[in-house]
Amino acid sequence: MATPENNSKDSNVKSTIDAVTGLAKAVPIYNDAVQPAAKEIGKSLATVTKTINIALAPISALVWGYDKISEFVQNRVAEKLKDTPEENIVTPDPAVVGPALEALRYTGNNETLRELYANLIANSMDKDTVTKAHPGFVEIIKNMTADEGLILKVFHPNIYKPIVDIKLKIKNGKGEHNLVNNYSNIGKEAGCQHEDLTPQYVDNLCRLGLLHIPAGRHLVGENAYDILLKTEEYEKFIAQYETEHTTTNVINKYIELTELGAQFRQACVIDKK
């Protein structure tokens, strides 16, 4: 049987949903109105249109409607707030919660991204953490992949991770070009589904202002880069390019959380509960 305290918390969480009714209506992905136009153009185009509709049909099942979002917030967000004192639960800023709920329509089926939104919403409802829940974080999550969300979990404030650029040089000459920028083991450490895209993930997280690679700086520990350069994966990669005419050159760097990244981590990445 629910206690009065729990009922009060449930009521506060429910009010969040009621305040944004209408933002989470399911959107049709396609409709049959295109068919008459397609038939006018020709049978072949109608066939293509039908094929496209069939290909898009599964997407409609992934778009969350109001009921699904309401259920998610009332259960998952409430779970994250269960240990928050009742007097701390406040009405959230609609500039945070409204866009977050709307974004869940399209990312709710992705566990990693929906957890980022759930933490953000929960923090926006706790007066002790509400200042961490920046409205801009919704747009940041919308510009991230699930793998990038996993990468942020392995970063901590004031912890530097080794990262390198690998260049191909012509022996006895001055020519060189980049083989890989931002080579690291971060994707492997984070358990990314697509480890080979880690350099691009790093680029995007830097673009979003969450990570930073200081120009011209590197780690000074004697074995700081062994975790990258003394591995079987690295040796296999380099072996493809080491020939009698070419060699490789490594530029040592490091990567760290920015202040914005640290705030994002507190508001969205760390489990609220």
Image: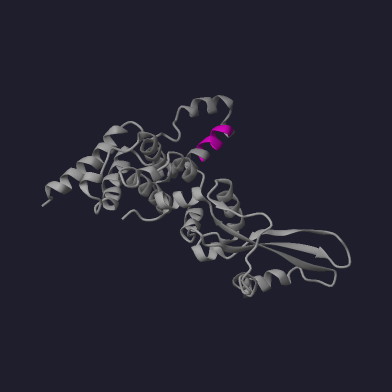
**52, 6: nearer the viewer:** 6
In the rendered structure, the answer to whether residue 37 lies left or right of residue 121 reads right
48 magenta-colored: yes
The correct choice, above or below, for 95 with respect to 157 in the image is above
**62, 86: nearer the viewer:** 86
Q: Give the colour scheme shown.
A: one colour
Q: Quadrant of residue 131?
A: top left
**221, 10: nearer the viewer:** 221
Residue 61 visible to an observer of this rendering? no
Q: Residue furthest right?
A: 172
Residue 114 visible to an observer of this rendering? yes
Q: Which residues are magenta?
A: 45-51
**x, y (%) of residue 47?**
54, 36
Residue drawn at (61%, 57%) of the image: 199
Numbered label tally:
0
Which quarter of the image is occupied by the C terminus?
bottom left
Q: Quadrant of residue 188?
A: bottom right
Q: Residue furthest left?
A: 1
**x, y (%) of residue 202?**
58, 54
The correct choice, above or below, for 212 with respect to 137 in the image is below
**x, y (%) of residue 123?**
34, 47
In the rendered structure, the answer to whether residue 176 lies left or right of residue 124 reads right
Q: Quadrant of residue 43?
A: top right
21 magenta-colored: no
Q: Main secondary structure of the magenta part?
A: helix
In the rendered structure, the answer to whether residue 222 lies left or right of residue 14 reads right
**10, 157: nearer the viewer:** 157
**x, y (%) of residue 19?**
29, 33
The correct choice, above or below, for 102 with respect to 209 in the image is above
